[in-house]
Image: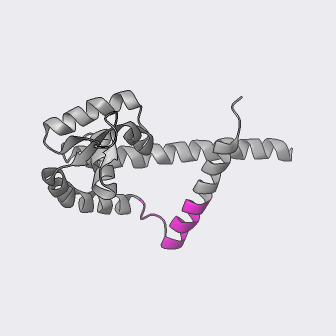
Amino acid sequence: MAERHELDTSLKLFIVLSRAFRALNDKANQSIQSFKLNPTEFAVLELLYHKGEQPLQQIGGKILLASGSITYVVDKLENKGLLVRKACPKDRRVTYAQITDEGKQLLNEIFPKHEQHIHTLVDGLTQQEKEQAIQLIKKLGLNAQQKTDH
């Protein structure tokens, strides 16, 4: 009996997490699209804005995107004048993406709005609840990563 209850609770947790993620993600993406960027373009720009130039080969892993899609996104951002490709002087096989001054100016303008929007989306939780949620969800994710595939 307890095992059935635990299974049902696990399934319910998964569904609740999935629906919450979808709701938050959909609203965040709507905010991003209001800035005339798609979520992937925003993620690449935000990474370069906060972390500096990045090897193209590593961007996909950092923003959870397939490497084949990165070239397309980088091309679009380069055409918009928001980033440039820069050859690595030490290794010709490596190319970096670097945010331009125009890209920095755009992020200076839109990131505070985006950040405030995210804050508004999660303001249903108190500060303490947010901190607890961070710890619990992180614990859940780390545990899931350690499991073997069936």
Main secondary structure along the magenta-highlighted residues: helix
The one nearer the camera, 100 or 145, is 100
Percent across and percent down for residue 125 are 48, 65
Instruction: Name which residue lies at 59% across and 55% down.
Output: 138
Q: Residue furthest right?
A: 1
Residue 129 in percent (x, y) is at 54, 68
> Residue 126, relative to residue 28: is it above or below?
below
Within the magenta stretch, is there residue 104? no
Identify the coloring: one colour
Q: Is residue 43 among the parts visible in the rendering?
A: no
Q: Is residue 72 visible?
A: yes
- Using the image as rendered, state which of residue 108 and residue 136 is in the foreground: 108
Q: Is residue 79 left or right of residue 20?
A: left
Residue in the image at 37% along x and 41% along y: 59
Q: Is residue 139 above or below residue 149?
A: below
Whole-percent x, y for residue 116 in the image: 30, 63
Is 123 part of what is drawn in magenta?
yes
Quadrant containing the C terminus is top right
Q: Quadrant of the N terminus?
A: top right
Image check: 53 left or right of 24? left
Residue drawn at point x = 57 percent, y = 46 percent: 16
Image quadrant in which you'd find residue 122: bottom left
Q: Which residue lies at the image location 72% right of the left edge and 42% below the top edge?
A: 8
Q: In this orientation, which residue lies closer to the viewer: 63 or 14?
A: 63
Drawn side of residue 77 relative to residue 28, left or right: left
Which residues are drawn in magenta?
Answer: 122-135
Count of marks placed on residues? 0
Instruction: Pick the residue in front: 104 or 39.
Output: 104
Q: Position of residue 2 (x, y in %)?
A: 84, 47
